[in-house]
Image (cartoon, helix red, strand yellow):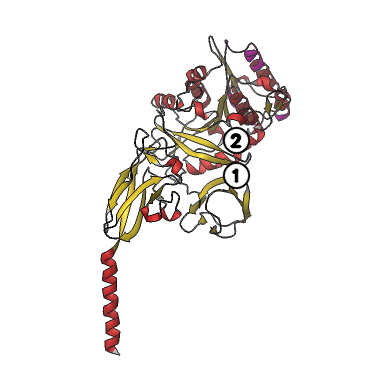
Amino acid sequence: MRIFFDMRIIISLILFNFILNTFGQMTIKIVSVPIYYTPALDTVFIVGDFNNWNARDTAWQMENNHDGTYQITFTLPLGTNMEYKFTRGSWDNVETQADGSFLPNRNAAYSNGGTINCQVANWSDLLGSHTASGNTGIIDLDFYMPELGRTRRIWAYLPPDYYNTNNYYPVLYLHDAQNLFDAVYAFGSEWSVDESMQSMFNTFSPSAIIIGIDNGEADRLNEYSPWVNSQYGGGQGEAYAAFIVNTLKPFVDNYFRTLPGREYTGIMGSSMGGLISFFSSMNYQNVFGKAGIFSPSFWFSDSIYSFISQTGHQSPMRMYFLAGDQESSSMIPDINSVMNALSSAGFSGNEMHLKTVQGGQHAEWFWASEFSEAFQWLFDGVSSMNDTYSRLPIAIFNSNNKTMSFHDSPDNSFYEVFNIQGQLICSGIVIETTLDFSYLEKGIYFFRYKGLVVKIVV
């Protein structure tokens, strides 16, 4: 009996040694990606002959180190010759060479304990001669807007010292983000907001986090006016403003080091973007303390005047109005009429400023040239705050076991899960520190909880 037992031990050791010498762990790490054009919320996958070239195999999802690097550690038979590539979940966004041309499969021989460092030069869906600078990047290509049942590209500019300090910063929300940072996406010229913020950094304090929201193209007029114009549409502006306040701002305040108070929060836009900036700042005076209102389309609806009188003055405000004398003949008179209505509603002259510019036109170049001055007037006297306290995210999704974990204690708060089409998949009450979503089919989902929206890739 003892001999039989000893033989079992010997056989087990032989098998263990065989496995040890035929299988091993290996790490593949992406040490750099296109800094401006790898959306922060996107997931990176390694795909290859080992998983039948599945572009979004969650078993081969790479860990995001949140410093521009990604890695995965796995086990395969030693000596395996691997062919692989990187995607962001689809063959439509596979990696390419720097010039956008086809990148042949990567090759590696599997070795125990080894690490292969890789660089991603470009992505197939984000090609072009980009002009963004500084800490500018895309947060998400399809950030969900539950108030409107749509998705939108969201951008962020971070101050030059963001990664070198523990500072918390004011935030300015801007519309028509296609025109803010990158000429590739601009309708004509861009505002060069990133370059302007960079140049002001050493001469004006505070700097700020800039959040850019792409317009909805065909939905632009509808989203940028809370009132309906019988000829041009409108009417979805209240829902759009609610998206910024109830969904986007909570995400930004959770994801970045922000100063969330109204005195540190502004909103800015031009033309129809100026109209929705004015409406948002008035309707949510508890959220926004500053508004940049460039060449506003106040002509869109006379309802603006009853809105001003009914809303009234609720909190201290700074409103910067801008117009050029080469715009429509009604532009400056309309702004003066609105400012008079604001005065009647209780706003003081110190809370409003109108700048009219000789030769100024209803054009991107004009608004770009005036951005820095407007920013400085709005944020004069405000400072960033140094704080070593690091806030934890409210909720984090673990793609490996498909669970959502909460850092705060369960308090019976309500949650909802939507699919990419905006359809409600499930909802419930949080009564434990972990929620199990293993029943979800593969796809992209959005988890909404306490105003926070978390993107889930299953």
Q: Is residue 449 visible?
A: no
Residue corresponding to mark 1? 421
Given residues 411 and 97, the one toward you in this image is: 97
Quadrant into which the N terminus falls: bottom left
- The residue at the point 27 percent across, 75 percent down is 13
Q: Which residue is mark 2?
A: 287
Q: Is residue 48 magenta?
A: no
Q: Residue 404: horizontal and vertical position, in percent?
A: 52, 55
Instruction: Give, as a single range, the part of the protein colored magenta.
Output: 310-334
Helix, strand or loop under label 1: loop
The percent position of residue 369, horizontal first and vertical second, equals 48, 18
User: Measured from the top left, where is residue 431 in percent x and y?
Assistant: 59, 59
Figure check: 421 above or below 80: above
The amino acid on which the numbered mark 2 sits, given as a three-letter code, is Val
Left or right, 398 with reference to 104:
right
> Callout 2: helix, strand or loop?
loop
* Quadrant in the picture for residue 14: bottom left
Tell me: residue 148, above or below residue 357.
below
Q: In this image, 197 relative to 438: left or right?
A: left
Q: Which mark is residue 65?
A: none
Determine crowd level at label 2: few under 14, some 14-19, many 20+ residues with C-alpha closer than 10 A: many
417 or 160, which is in the foreground? Answer: 417
Question: In this image, 27 relative to 371: left or right?
Answer: left
Q: Is residue 317 magenta?
A: yes
Type of residue at label 1? Answer: Gln
- Judge depth for marks 1 and 2 and give the one in front: 1
Quarter of the view holding residue 288: top right
The CA span between labels 1 and 2 is 29 Å
Q: Position of residue 407 (x, y in %)?
A: 51, 54
